[in-house]
Amino acid sequence: MNPRTLLADAARRLAEAGVESPRVDAELLLAHVVGRSRAGLLTLDDVADADAGRFDALVEQRADRVPLQHLTGRAPFRLLELAVGPGVFVPRPETELLVEWALERLAGLDGPVVVDLGSGSGAIALSIAHEHPGARVTAVERDPGALAWTRHNALARAGARDTPVGVVAGDMTDPQLLTELDGRVDLVVSNPPYVPDGARVPREVAEHDPPLALWGGSDGLNVVRGMLGVAARLLRPGGWLGIEHADQQGTALPAVIRSHGGFTAVEDHPDLAGRPRFTTARRA
């Protein structure tokens, strides 16, 4: 079958379903089915009937708002490609900015100790380990479903000869979490649950992202409040904290961190679109 006809029809169906990037999603799905890169579709002259049938089924699922990354099983993040699927939060491009900030804080440190709280797919932890070889990174995840993906991706990256990342089953608000690292951690990073209860979110999020990765109480910051004590205990004096948040929390989250009393140099940072995206602070 003609790939251009298939793509035009798929893009139309996805647009009618309200998918934000219908043509791009259609191309990525077809590339996945035929085993090519998206750019490689430019030289594709024919699609076998069996592949066309698989493509049609995937387009139908995407039109039903199943996340694209669940359908391909992969999510690109900075220099990595991570395995994702049902049960784990799909990493977003905006989180890459938090990793960039973290790597800048770690520059010049030999064997820094890093903790990623609420690791999910492991995107933050594994990117830091990959881009700062020698970093001693621990990824903490509470949700058993997500934890399976954390471990899977950590094993895959270790097999790629990256710096190994330790994976720990635990709650980021647990006062007894990682007590063996008290006062020894150079950097704590987190993309915690921060969506206010009852907020409207896209179907891809509401129906497919795990609830434990989303909901953060009435103002979205309940988990963060519980996590700050853990972060303060783990960090050495002068160690850094970085926390992602929702667009509307660029004032509220810095205020929560300041009210804790254990941090200085509290600052909020925008994403590439200029929206408030993550807050950083330094252990007093």
Image (cartoon, rainbow, N blue to C red):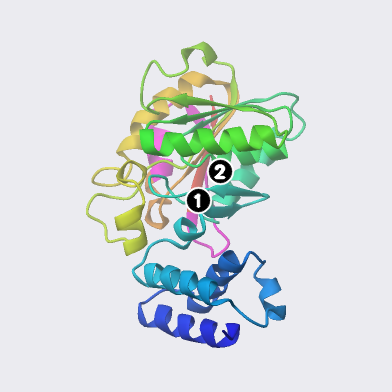
- Label 2 environment density (alpha carbons within 10 Å; few <14, some 14–19, many ≥20): many
Residue found farthest to the front: 49
Pick whichever, 79 or 265, lies toward us. 79
Give yes or no for contact between labels 2 and 1 (Cβ–Cβ under 8 Å): yes
Question: Does the stretch in magenta take in 114?
Answer: no
**In the depicted structure, whether residue 79 falls above or below residue 160:** below
- Whether residue 265 is visible here, answered yes or no, is no
Q: Name the residue beneath numbered marker 1.
A: 91
Residue 195 on image: x %, y %: 33, 50
Residue occupying the point 51% across, 11% down:
180
**Figure disc tally:** 2
Start-end of magenta stretch: 253-276
Q: What's the residue type where badge 1 is placed?
A: Pro
Residue 233 on image: x %, y %: 47, 19
Residue 63 on image: x %, y %: 37, 72
Task: Determine which quarter of the picture holds residue 282.
Answer: top right
Residue 162 on image: x %, y %: 70, 34
